[in-house]
Amino acid sequence: MTSVVTTALVFLLTTPASAAITGTGTCVGITSPLTANLTCVGDVYVDGGSTLNIGNDTANVTLDVGSGTVCVGFSATAPCNTLAGSGTIIVDPPTATGTYGRIVATNMVVASGSVIQTNGTGCPASQSYDASIPGCANKGSGATAGFGEGSDATTNSSGGGGGSYGGAGGSGYVGHAGGNVYGSVDLTTIQLGSGGGNNTVGVGVAGGAGGGAMRLDVSGTLTVDGTISANGTNGLTGTPVGCSSAHATIII
C-alpha cells in the first residue's frame, strides 16, 4: 500500500507540463519579456499559461522569425499541431514615442482561448495621440482642440468623454464631449488610441487608457481561432465616474 501511494504522488508532481515559451532553431533562447529586437530562424511556441511580453518604454521591439511560425497556445512539437491550453502574447508599445511592437513570421496560429493583445497600452487618460511628437500628451478636449482625448468631467455626477481613434469618442454622462476622429489610411502609419476623460472633481477618478498598436507581418497564413485585440480599457468606476477609452488599430 505504501509503495502505491508513493508512486502516485511522484506521478502527479512530475507529469504536468509547466507553462513555457520555447523556440526551435536559433529562436531556442527566446524569453519574456522581450525588450530588444530579436531576429531568429525557427518556430516560437507560447503554450498554455504562458505570457510573452514584447516591448520596452523607449523604442519599437520586433520579433522576426523569418520563415518560421509563431504558435500561440501550442506546445513545441511540430509547428502548431499540439494544443496546450491558452497562451498569451502582450505587445506593449512605448506611449512616450507612440510606437508599436511588431511580429514578423511566415505563418501564425492563435489557438482557441489564446490571445495576442495590446489592450490599454495606448495613451493614458486625458491624453491624445499627437503624430507631430509622435507620442501622447494632454492636448485639451478633443471637441475643442481637434485631438482624440475625451473631455474631463467637472461635476461629481458626470463622466468624462470617451477617447477616440478611427471613430469619434462617445459623450460622457451629462454630455462631456468625446475625442475627435483621427488616424491614417496609410497602413504603414500606426497610431495609438487616445485616453478617456478624467473626472477632476473631489478625489478624482481616472478615465480609461487607449488601445495600443501592433504590427503583424504574416507573409503566409494567419489562422486565428482565438483573439487578436487592441481594446481600450474602462475608466475606474464609482462616484465620480470616469469614462471608457478608445480602441486603436492593428496592422496585419
Image (cartoon, helix red, strand yellow):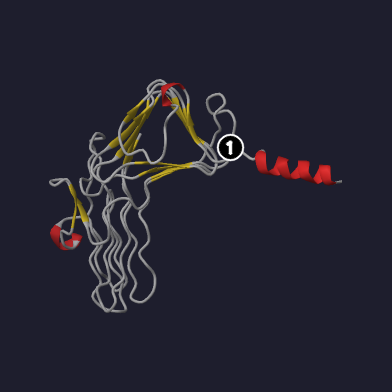
**Horizontal and vertical percent position of residue 119:** 37, 50
Image position of 94 (left or right of 2): left
Q: Secondary structure at mark 1?
A: loop
Q: Is residue 138 visible?
A: yes
Image position of 52 (left or right of 240): right
Residue 65 to residue 126: above or below: above
Image position of 199 (left or right of 228): left
Q: Tag 1: Cα neighbours inside 10 Å, few (<14), some, or many (≥20)?
A: many
Residue farthest toward the right in the current orientation of the protein: 1
Identify which residue, 252 or 77, lies in the foreground: 77
Quadrant position of the C terminus in the picture: top left
Please name the residue that numbered disc 1 is placed on: 84
Q: Residue at x 26, y 38 (%)?
A: 60
Residue 183 sits in which quadrant?
Answer: top left
Q: Residue at x 18, y 63 (%)?
A: 141
Residue 236 sits in which quadrant?
Answer: bottom left
**Horizontal and vertical percent position of residue 147:** 18, 55
Residue 189 sits in which quadrant?
Answer: top left
Residue 125 to residue 38: above or below: below
**Horizontal and vertical percent position of residue 185:** 24, 38
